[in-house]
Image: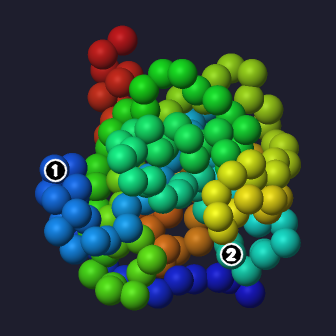
Amino acid sequence: MRVTGPATPDRVVSFEEARRLAQENAWREKALIYLTRDPAELLVLEHTASPRAGVQVPAGGVEPGEQPAQAALRELAEETGVVVHSAPVYLESRVWADGSAPSRVRHYFWIVAPPDVPDRWSHVVTAGDDDEGMRFRLGFRPRHAAGLTPGFGWESGLGRLARAIDDARGRR
C-alpha cells in the first residue's frame, strides 16, 4: 500500500514573507533538509516502527528564537546523527494552504553530506518532544527516484534543489 498525504497546495514565498506570516499568524515553521551525496543521491528516512509514515527527508520544527538554518543543522544531527559544520544552502520557503497542517511554513535547505557518511544506517532520535527515542532507517537513493511520500511536502523543494546543484556545478 502506497502512503500519501493530503493533496494540499502550497506556494513559494520569500524567506522574509514566510517568517513574517509565521510570526503574525502564530504558525509553526519547519526546516526540511535535502542532504545530498555525489550530488545525484538524496538521503531519505523511514520510521522503523511506523512504516505508514512513508519515506521522508530529515525535517523538524524551528524552535523559538532559532533561525531556520540553525534548525536545519540541529534537526539533521538529531534525526540522523550526521553533524555538519558548514552553513546549509537556503533553497526556498513555502506556505501551505491547509490550516490543519501542523507546520504551515516550511523552509527548504540543501546540505552536502560529509565524505564519511555511510550508504545506509539506523539512528535513534536524540531529542525532540515527539521524535525522541524513535528509530529511523536512513539511506541514500537516486535524487530523481527517491520515492518520497507525496502530499506532505517532502518533494516540494526538489526542483529548486536541482537548480541549485546546476548553479553550483556552473561555478566550478
- Quarter occupied by residue 26: bottom left
Q: Residue at x 85, y 72 (%)?
A: 49
Observer-nearest residue: 164 or 64? Answer: 64
The answer to whether residue 66 shows anywhere in this view is yes
Mark 1: which secondary structure? helix
- Quarter occupied by residue 62: bottom left
Residue behind mark 1 = 16
Instruction: Give x and y (percent) for residue 95.
Output: 27, 68
Observer-nearest residue: 107 or 70? Answer: 70
Instruction: Give x and y (percent) for residue 34.
Output: 51, 45
Q: Considering only vertical position in the picture, is 91 above or below 31?
A: above
Numbered label attached to residue 167: none
Q: CA distance from mark 1 to mark 2?
A: 31 Å
- Give the position of the N terminus as an image quadrant: bottom right
Q: Considering only vertical position in the picture, is 154 above or below 167?
A: below
Residue 145 is left or right of residue 26, and the answer is right
- Front tag of 1 and 2: 1
Instruction: Give x and y (percent) for residue 14.
Output: 16, 52
Q: Badge 1: how crowded within 10 Å, few (<14), some, or many (20+)?
A: few
Q: Amino acid at mark 2?
A: Ala
**Which is more N-terminal, label 2 or label 1?**
1
Residue behind mark 2 = 53
The answer to whether residue 138 shows anywhere in this view is no
Residue 15 is left or right of residue 127, and the answer is left
Q: Residue at x 53, y 29 (%)?
A: 112
Q: Residue at x 68, y 75 (%)?
A: 53
